[in-house]
């Protein structure tokens, strides 16, 4: 007759489980840190080919993409004056370098607009093109990044069109959708009117 397995004290099991969890966390943190450092080093090596010195210790996670990147240029807003004396706002965009592991090259990211609420931190950065020449960095500094457009859906398209109408930026596609919507509304109004007339007979 087999002997029953020895009972492990609950407190001992809990302690072992906590220790195992702490070890797993430490190993995972080490892997994350190693990946962070490796990516930052890849970016620095690629930038060095363009005679750009970057500090890997300043690497951070770009919330817009979730990728590790290194800051290159801190943006600033300034007031310029044209030939007629009118003042206007201009911006040097915040630019950082991300690593594209598929293309094995640096991908530039930048802020979008001087009135973007994320401008002060310069941390919400959008695609601004690959760094193949120094001119690519110059373009990102002057023009900033471009927020990726989200696919049009039944929920998002009306808001986009109304926003465009309010901002006088509606395009031909938007006009076509508005015209179709008006036609549908007119048809529904006719159906409703016909139903009312039918009930009154």
Image (spheres, helix red, strand yellow):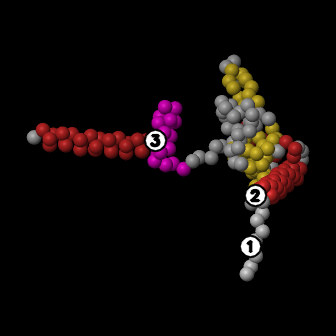
Instruction: In this rendered view, identify the residue nearer to me: 33 or 123.
Output: 33
Q: Are marks 3 and 2 in contact (CB under 8 Å)?
A: no
Q: Quadrant of residue 115?
A: top right
**Residue 111 image position (x, y, % from top left):** 70, 38
Callout 1: few (<14), some (14-19), or many (20+) C-alpha neighbours within 10 Å?
A: few
Q: Quadrant of the N terminus?
A: bottom right
Q: Look at the numbered disc 3 and give the secondary structure of its residue.
A: helix
- Tell which residue pokes out farthest to the top in this image: 85
Instruction: In this rendered view, identify the residue nearer to me: 21 or 114.
Output: 21
The answer to whether residue 100 is above or below residue 78 is: below
Callout 3: few (<14), some (14-19), or many (20+) C-alpha neighbours within 10 Å?
A: some
Q: Earlier in the sequence, mark 1 or mark 2?
A: 1
Which residue is labeled 3 in the image? Answer: 158
The answer to whether residue 31 is above or below residue 69 is: below
Q: Look at the numbered disc 1 and give the secondary structure of its residue.
A: loop
Q: Look at the numbered disc 2 and give the secondary structure of its residue.
A: helix
Disc number for residue 4: 1
**Residue 4 image position (x, y, % from top left):** 74, 73
**Residue 76 image position (x, y, % from top left):** 76, 30
Whether residue 43 is visible here, answered yes or no, is: no
Q: Are marks 1 and 2 in contact (CB under 8 Å)?
A: no
For the residues labelled 3 and 2, the Cα–Cα distance comes to: 59 Å
**69 to the left or right of 153:** right
Which residue is labeled 2 in the image? Answer: 10
The answer to whether residue 162 is above or below residue 177 is: above
For the residues labelled 1 and 2, the Cα–Cα distance comes to: 17 Å
On whether residue 76 falls in the magenta region, the answer is no
Callout 2: few (<14), some (14-19), or many (20+) C-alpha neighbours within 10 Å?
A: few
First to last magenta residue range: 151-173
Front: mark 1 or 2: 1
Whether residue 146 is visible here, answered yes or no, is: yes
């Amino acid at each position: 007759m087999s002997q029953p397995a020895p009972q492990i004290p609950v407190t001992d099991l809990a302690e072992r489980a906590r220790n195992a969890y702490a070890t797993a966390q430490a190993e995972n943190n080490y892997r994350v840190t190693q990946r962070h450092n490796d990516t930052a080093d890849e970016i620095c090596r690629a930038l060095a080919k363009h005679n750009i010195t970057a500090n890997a210790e300043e690497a951070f996670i770009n919330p817009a993409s979730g990728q590790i990147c290194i800051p290159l240029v801190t943006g600033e807003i300034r007031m310029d004056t044209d030939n007629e004396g009118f003042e206007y706002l201009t911006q040097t965009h915040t630019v950082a370098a991300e690593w594209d592991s598929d293309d094995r090259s640096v991908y530039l990211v930048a802020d979008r607009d001087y009135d973007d609420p994320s401008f002060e931190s310069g941390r919400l950065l959008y695609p601004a093109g690959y760094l193949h020449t120094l001119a690519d960095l110059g373009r990102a500094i002057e023009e900033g990044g471009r927020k990726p457009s989200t696919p049009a859906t039944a929920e998002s398209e009306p808001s986009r069109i109304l926003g465009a109408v309010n901002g006088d930026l509606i395009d031909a596609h938007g006009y076509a959708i508005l015209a179709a919507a008006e036609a549908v509304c007119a048809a529904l109004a006719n159906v409703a009117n016909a139903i009312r007339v039918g009930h009154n007979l």
